[in-house]
Amino acid sequence: MKKIKAYERLLNYVVVDTPSDPDATTTPTTQCQFNLANLLVKELHELGVENAFVDDLCYVYAQIPATKGYEDCMSLGFIAHMDTAPDFNGYGVKPQIIENYDGKDVQLGTSGRVLSVKDFPHLANLKGRTLITTDGTSLLGSDDKSGVAEIMTMVERILTEDIPHGKICIGFTPDEEVGAGADHFDVINFGADIAYTVDGGEEGGIEYENFNACGVTFEISGFNVHPGSAKNTMINASLVAMEINSMLPSVETPANTEDYEGFYHLASMEGTVESAKLSYIIRDHSSELFEARKQTVKHIAKIINEKYGEGTVTLAIKDQYRNMREKIEPHMHLVENAKTAIRNEGLEPLVVPVRGGTDGARLSFMGLPCPNLGTGGYAFHGPFEHVTVEGMDHCVNIIIGIIKEYAKR
């Protein structure tokens, strides 16, 4: 029977609508995610993974027993998410397939949008490959349906080729894009000692450092009187909000930082004379600098309340996730084995810090050390999202290469 390639699976998956909803309070946040979950369980059963199932919260689990004689190998997990980002239209995806791509600008259907080399210089390096894009009216869903497709393709190859392996555990999650992918993940019954999320970018990527993160909200209460008699009386909440923002370092924003540099990001603002609200996210790879940033916003709130009166500002800080490096470092074989598999595929490992968070970070703190692998995709969360057939093939081979490395031990 002809084997299905990863990109063919991707094309089947992206037409299944699965956007998550940041405003929903249910799990999953959108019922349409069950459509892909059920499809994957059916496909796993057809491949011979009879124990595959989807639970009531839309988490898909499956296990492949170890090859006889390899039962003592570490149990290895691979995890990807089924939902797509709510940042841009994720419904009615119509992928474009461009064979023997010429490395030049690509018209995205009749949308008027152009995937340009000027905006995405790496496109020149993809010349000669088969490029998969959107038609400009939606995102593609390569994040993370490429990861799902690559894991599924690995499963087919493991079950049809003579590849010795320890126990392999498969997990597909909902709602990663709204920060809830790990909320109900059953780490214990998943059955893996260690795992990888397959949710990164360029093939050959391996990520095991991410931001420490929190959300910060300043609620400002003003004092509104007639502007004609406001001298020494009015407290304009919107102006106080502007003052608060001016007290933060202007160069430490996402637009001015890169690599390991942290930032304060003003995500939203609203206000009148009577009341105002500023919502920020704070990020830093260094736990010490992260704590210093939180102390900075606390100090700002203190100064404002001393200036305008206690209760003018109410500050709320909510921790979101932490840098998984501290949980990966005791298990650096995860990174070293991935590097070996990447080099065996003829690529040079791309070890870069994640300027964000992943399910792997939260899972690592839940007891499942879990760095992140590249999927071959680019420009996620928008109409310019794209991936190549060849890049996906590399990623499948890397996953299988990692499995082979652990079967040596």
Image: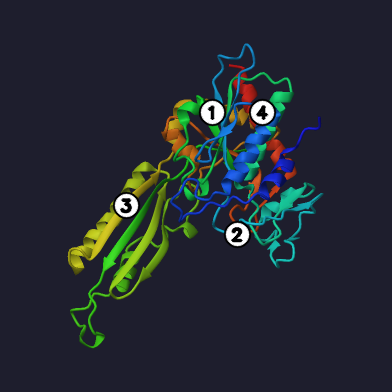
Contact (CB < 8 A) between labels 4 and 3? no
Contact (CB < 8 A) between labels 4 and 2? no
For mark 3, what is the residue?
317
Cα distance, mark 4 to mark 2?
33 Å
Q: Is mark 3 on a helix, strand or loop?
A: strand
Residue 99, placed above or below residue 249 = above
Mark 4 / mark 3, whichever is N-terminal: 3
Residue at the spot x=66%, y=32% of the render?
44
Mark 1 / mark 3, whichever is N-terminal: 3
For mark 4, what is the residue?
400
Mark 1 / mark 2, whichever is N-terminal: 2
Q: Is mark 4 on a helix, strand or loop?
A: helix
Residue 395, placed above or below residue 385 = above
Residue 310: image location, x then y, percent: 17, 63
Q: Which amino acid does label 3 sit on?
A: Ile
In the displayed structure image, the side of residue 325 where residue 395 appears, left or right: right
For mark 1, what is the residue?
334
Q: Residues within 10 Å of mark 4 (few under 14, many from 20)?
A: many
